[in-house]
Image (spheres, rainbow, N blue to C red):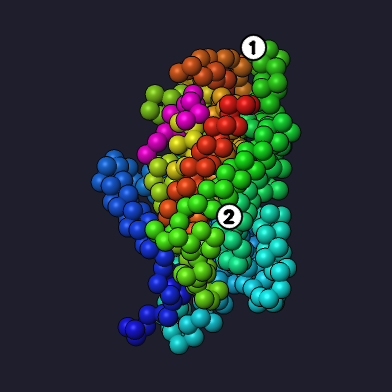
């Protein structure tokens, strides 16, 4: 990795920061922007004679960053039905926290939560989930409920929905999972 | 020198070997991975997100290391102590250590090994996150694991020689030390890039549900490959793993012996000492789990 690679990386980070792609990194865009600017200055100071090459590398990095940011948030793969204690305020997290503290407090009761909809895939039921990201997309974890809809659902994958249903408990592969049974799924606009 | 190539020093042999290993792993993954465009683009996003998220910390660590080396006299005994103190109190993510490791160049290998291991596992931010997710007891166990792991690493580094030589107390970095801020940055970011490629590739191939009831040995192995950020590992452990021992193994091994840490140690001390340090972290992890 040389100065041109540093410039490429600066362009990549710059582009991701400018696009405000919150699905990729949790760092504030201003911080990433400052780091990218510092990287560019360091690369330029180290290789002043190759300014054209650096500019080209920066542009290539910016293009790559824009392309990656345009891909959108990574799809939900596996949804965990229990939330870690550190998360933002949200109805879905509150419900999972209550279940974690005392499962009988909500079991059998009808609740309503909002989150991202994922249709059934690979033998897994449909889910409603929210993403917790501490540092970057690689360590993001999706937590939420399995959903057993009352009727057919016409919502696209990744859409923001509100699901109202009765809390049920199932055992899958030795793991206790919470679900919303007999649920009504409504897209939130 | 070929025109257009920048006058950087040659990278450490272990780094070149790791690059070759990462390239081979990517080739194997790309040939064995099912043709799933979405999964490949997720892997690319994961890899880029790791590097971009680490970037501010690596830049900050490198600039801090550079400032320390520039402004403090080499004859004075304080720079070494100050470098150690700053590393131990590192307020940000452990990624900063990748840039900061150069500031420990004047310290002996056992001291540098202790600091790099302890600061990676038990940085203030990591302990705060662990405390918030699991409570005080687990945070204390994490700090104890970090101290044990760092102590064993320091002890081992006294006796493991560099590349067959008998240098028992100097960091191998001194002979391969990058001269400029730019070369320090490239060296640090190369290590992160390699571990990011491997972590993203592994994540793309292994379903998250696979780890739900994995024993602590499996959790440790998972942590070695994924090597998540020290501020993220408590959340990942809480969400992905059920067994408390597995959760502890995940947190300790991710930072003590994870790919990212291994790359840092290999760059700083050479591959033999990096492997010895990783083994020490594994032993410390097993001991902590045994007493917890």
Mark sitting on residue A108: 1
**Chain hosting mark 1:** A
- For mark 2, name the chain: B
Give the image location of residue B249, x and y in percent. 55, 34
> Which residue lies at the image location 28% right of the left edge and 47% below the top edge?
B28
Depth check: A38 or B22 in front?
B22
- List x then y, in percent, for residue B198: 40, 49
Task: Name the residue carrying label 2.
Answer: B110
- Report the front residue among A22 and A102: A102
Which quarter of the image is occupied by the C terminus of chain B? top right
Q: Which numbered circle lies on residue B71?
A: none
Apparent side of residue A8 relative to residue B33 in the rendered image (left or right): right
Crowd tier of the residue under label 1, counting other residues whose Cα lies within 10 Å: few below 14, some 14–19, many 20 or above: some
Q: Callout 2: helix, strand or loop?
A: helix
Q: Which range is magenta?
A: B205-217
Residue B212 on the magenta span: yes
Q: Residue at x 45, y 56 (%)?
A: B161
Q: A150 left or right of B3?
A: right
């Amino acid at each position: 990795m040389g100065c041109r690679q540093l410039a490429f990386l600066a362009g990549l980070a710059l582009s991701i920061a400018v696009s405000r792609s919150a699905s990729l990194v949790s760092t504030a865009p201003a911080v990433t922007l400052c780091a990218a600017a510092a990287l560019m200055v360091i690369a330029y100071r180290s290789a002043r004679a190759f300014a054209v090459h650096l500019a080209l590398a920066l542009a290539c990095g910016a293009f790559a960053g824009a392309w990656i940011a345009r891909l959108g948030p990574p799809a939900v793969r596996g949804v965990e039905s229990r939330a870690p204690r550190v998360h933002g305020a949200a109805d879905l997290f509150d419900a999972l926290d209550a279940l974690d503290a005392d499962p009988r407090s909500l079991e059998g009761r009808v609740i309503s939560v909002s989150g991202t909809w994922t249709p059934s895939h690979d033998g897994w039921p449909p889910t409603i989930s929210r993403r917790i990201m501490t540092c970057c997309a690689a360590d993001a974890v999706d937590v939420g409920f399995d959903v057993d809809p009352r009727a057919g659902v016409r919502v696209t994958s990744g859409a923001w929905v509100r699901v109202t249903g009765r809390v049920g408990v199932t055992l899958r592969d030795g793991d206790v999972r919470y679900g919303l049974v007999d649920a009504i799924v409504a897209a939130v606009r | 020198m070929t025109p257009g190539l920048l006058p950087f020093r040659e990278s450490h042999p272990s780094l070149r070997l790791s690059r070759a290993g990462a390239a081979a792993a990517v080739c194997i993954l790309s040939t064995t991975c099912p043709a799933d465009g979405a999964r490949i683009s997720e892997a690319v996003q994961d890899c880029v997100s790791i590097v971009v998220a680490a970037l501010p910390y690596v830049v900050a660590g490198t600039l801090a290391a550079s400032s320390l080396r520039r402004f403090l006299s080499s004859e004075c005994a304080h720079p070494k102590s100050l470098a150690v103190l700053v590393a131990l109190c590192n307020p940000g993510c452990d990624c900063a250590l990748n840039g900061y490791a150069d500031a420990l160049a004047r310290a002996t290998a056992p001291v540098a090994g202790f600091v790099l291991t302890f600061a990676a596992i038990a940085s203030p931010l990591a302990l705060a996150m662990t405390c918030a997710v699991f409570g005080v007891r687990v945070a204390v166990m994490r700090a104890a694991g970090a101290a044990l792991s760092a102590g064993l690493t320091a002890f081992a580094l006294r006796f493991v020689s560099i590349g067959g030589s008998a240098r028992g107390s100097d960091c191998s970095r001194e002979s391969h030390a990058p001269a400029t801020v730019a070369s320090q940055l490239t060296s640090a970011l190369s290590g992160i890039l390699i571990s990011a490629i491997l972590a993203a590739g592994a994540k793309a191939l292994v379903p998250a549900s696979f780890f739900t009831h994995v024993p602590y040995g499996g959790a440790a192995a998972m942590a070695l490959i994924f090597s998540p950020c020290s501020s993220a590992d408590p959340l990942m452990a809480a969400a992905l793993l059920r067994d408390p021992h597995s959760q502890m193994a995940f947190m300790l091994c991710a930072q003590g012996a994870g790919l990212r840490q291994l790359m840092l140690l290999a760059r700083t001390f050479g591959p033999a000492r990096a492997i010895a340090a990783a083994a020490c972290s594994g032993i410390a992890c097993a001991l902590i789990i045994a007493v917890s």
